[in-house]
Amino acid sequence: MNNSSEKYLRLFGVTEAQMRQLVAEGLRGGGDWCDLYFEDTVATDLVLRDGEVSSGGSQEDYGCGIRVLDGEKTGYAYAESTAWNELLRAARAAGSIAAGSKSGSAAVKATPGTPQSARYGNCYPIKTDWRDTEAAQFVPVLRKLDAAIRQKDSRVQKVVAVLSWQMSEIMMFNSLGELTADTRPVASIIASVIFRQGNQIENKTVSRSFRKGAEMITDALVEELACKAVEGLDDRFEARRPKGGEMPVVMAAGASGILLHEAMGHAFEADFNRKGQSVFADKMGKRVAMQGINILDDATIPGNRGSLNYDDEGVPGQKTYMVQDGVLRSYLHDRISARYYGIESTGNGRRESFRFNPIPRMRCTYMESGRDGTLQDLIGSVRKGIFVDQFANGQVKIGEGDFTFYVKSGYTIENGRLAMPVKDINIIGNGPEALADIKAVAGDLRIDDATWTCGKDQSAYVSCGIPSVLVNKLIVGGE
Amino acid sequence: MLSQEEKTLARECLEMAQECGAQKARVSFNKSSMDMVATLNGEVDKVTSCLDSSLEICLFVDGRFGSFSTNRTEKDALRGFISRAVRTVRMLAPDPCRDLPAPERVAKNSVTGRELEIYDAAILEMTAERRRQIALDAAASASEGRGWKMVSEEGEYSDSCELSYIVDSQGLEALQCETCFDYGVETTIEDSAGDKYSAYWWTSSPFLSKFDASSCGKTALDRAVAKIHPKRVRSGKYNMVVFEDVASKMVSPILNALGGYSIQQNNSFLLDSIGKQLFPKGMNLVDRPHIKGNTGSRLFDSEGVATKEHDIIRDGVVQEFFLNTFTAAKLGMEPTVESAIRPVLLPFSSAGPAPAGMGVDEILKLCGKGIFVTDFNGGNSNSATGDFSYGIEGFWFEDGKILKPVSEMLVTGNFISLWNNLLAAGDDSRQCKSKLIPTLAFKDVDFSG
């Protein structure tokens, strides 16, 4: 224990001795692992609508989740206070999973976290703690964003701008006696804009999100968002649905990382593989993409929305190569799956809040730059296909491997040149086939800093990135 | 149930808010419990026990508005929280459109919380052993069949109770209680070539006595087996039949487009639509929030406004927007309710009066040939234009008979033109849902494959 730990123990009103007692209570009926997850989160938001910052608020969420594992079986309960009787109730409820179990004593089978020496340092150093600010100081920021967007295009009809920030104090303790604590910021600024041209209405949403303090709010960020909000607007009004069907797809650097998240990332999450459900369940060590392709899931990018000093099981954040030189090298593990596979956790055990047990989740998923030239080279190599650059959402069916992502804007490609602007189309493919079908990777990796949120059972802040890539064939929605 | 102390605490929050400087306030005390047993391949895999309570506090201070929530319900902590909240609201711009609903609009008939008869005291008698037994009994019995074997079967039984108590500084007091017994199962199988197929099925009821999950495992398994060896169909225009279990995907964008926030922000493809014939004659979408004993019934919305039985679309004509106090004032219109509570799409046939009891088989026969959509895979719609594009899976059918599964296909179009190509709406929506949308059929829909 050190001074830093003392701060968290005081905040949650417990001692290490009491936490040991709770762990013992959870394991009283059997089981081989128990962990405690204390959380104190305060979130604040400000909303500009019709030119005025006229609504806002805050949410407090405080409690402790207690998990007991009996082999791969999970017992989970939580308390919304840290009153001793409430914590004991939760520990006993979680321990019921092991009722009658023949498991050995605590810690015998538990997988320790990666040694502290493996840490990459603080992934979210905070210069200005959001809690030391007053909401009033950000009112002018939203007004400035509203004015900047309106000033850039006369077709702007409505702007809703939202600034939200959240600070979470997290403390974890487990049956190995490991005590871990973290203070996590996350903040987002979003602008949803309605444009009108004649009788035609279009909408567009742009956002930026970081694990940073209030220093992230700058004039440059406001200007960047305003420019993004009106970018490509002429084409948006002219865009049509393309003729649908199977065709080559060139995906722009940055937000196209949604391809990796949906087509591969989920299928690499080890819980799906442990249960044999993933389409990649039997592909470890096998070639899944062309040589030279490296795909990672990374918790260590400073200030990134998906970064974590520690995951929600107390395992240090790390950088995990899932695919190296085209070969599947690692799934994304929490402690349960790591134990099942007999390896160390990759630090992917995440949860939405103390109300949820941790499961394997992505962090920032991206592909390293390739050596196949530029975006223009990729577009130039396609006779008839489609180029996509902005997205709304995606989904995957784990067993079949069929994934989709929704394209907000792009262009048809005719004889190596961008032709007709397109919008509002879904694209569908099969994960392993799409991964194997990536035929060119440009050297322009970009991480997208929008408000990506993954919804696998629980919400999780994530991000994604990719260099421009050419996928040989995907199915494009159209008329 | 909610204790007298908890009700008193909610009222004390109103007093604290006013002592701190709020002229008006609304407080909701939300409390819920949920116990869950999950199974994996016929064995208990996870048990979860949840108890939640939170206070939502809306403050109206000097013509300004803010919304706050906390799950720290100790009185001393609450006083500090509300005091800080009032200070925050004072930093915001005034907004004359923010106000509590007029007292004559709020619910006065929701006193015990049990008026709609969707609370079952049997939940108090549930034991851990009973929950385990229900979860284990619902699992499928077969683990392999001709050309397939089971990879995994993940089931989840839960029972929950939700209470919402709402008071405001103008005298509103309303309480709602609802229980839910729920089971869902996802089955994954593998064919002889190693290709995997997954399917899901579920059921729920507010009452333990009406809850029967015994066939869920088999239904999910049958649905997964039916998907073996899918084919892609050539891109083109086909009739589309959408299975009732997923048909709300076609209706939700309409309800969203009629929502006050969408209308006020011009972010709706149904702007200026009231009184207009935008949907086919004979199509009727109604809101039925007061059906006793049915999932999702409500006597009041989140403002405490009394819900009502009303038409949303009558004979193809849009009847009203969903306007809460704020959006109505912004638009200069009369407020209604903030959203559709329990929307019901009534049976429809483009060929004349819809026959009673029309289900999937009759609708497939009516359509003859096309694609029967049983699930969606991602996709989205443009709220301003009504354009949509979704991934689908389902079956190719001819002469009303299912011939082969299809996958990796997309359906693309615009909601206004889609609904004007409505061929039929069935009479088969399941009562366990809060949106009662039956099997639907549309003609000439663009599929890509």
Image: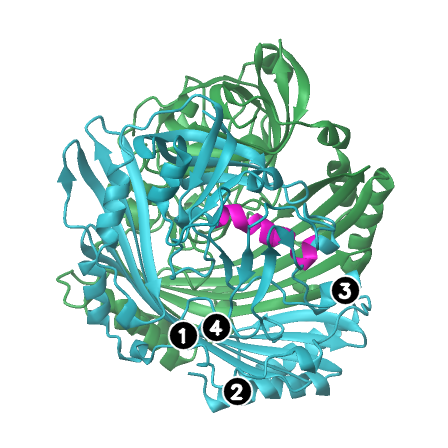
Chain colours: A green, B cyan
The numbered dot on residue A7 is none
Secondary structure state at the residue bearing disc 4: helix
Q: Left or right of B54: which side holds A100? A: left
- Residue B399 spot, x, y in % from top left: 34, 31
The numbered dot on residue B118 is 1
Q: Which residues are magenta?
A: B248-262
The amino acid beneath tag 1 is: Ile
- Residue B312 spot, x, y in % from top left: 60, 58
The amino acid beneath tag 4 is: Phe
- Callout 2: residue from which chain? B
- Callout 1: residue from which chain? B
- Callout 4: residue from which chain? A
| Quadrant (top left, top right, bottom left, bottom right) of the N terminus of chain A | bottom left
Mark pair 4, 3: CA separation: 49 Å
> Which residue corresponds to mark 4?
A12
Mark pair 2, 4: CA separation: 27 Å
Answer few, some or many: residues within 10 Å of disc 1's Cα (few below 14, many 20 plus, some between 14 and 19).
Answer: many
> Which residue corresponds to mark 3?
B333
- The reply to whether the C-beta atoms of the residues labelled 1 and 3 are less than 8 Å apart is no
Mark found first going from the N terminus, 2 or 1: 2
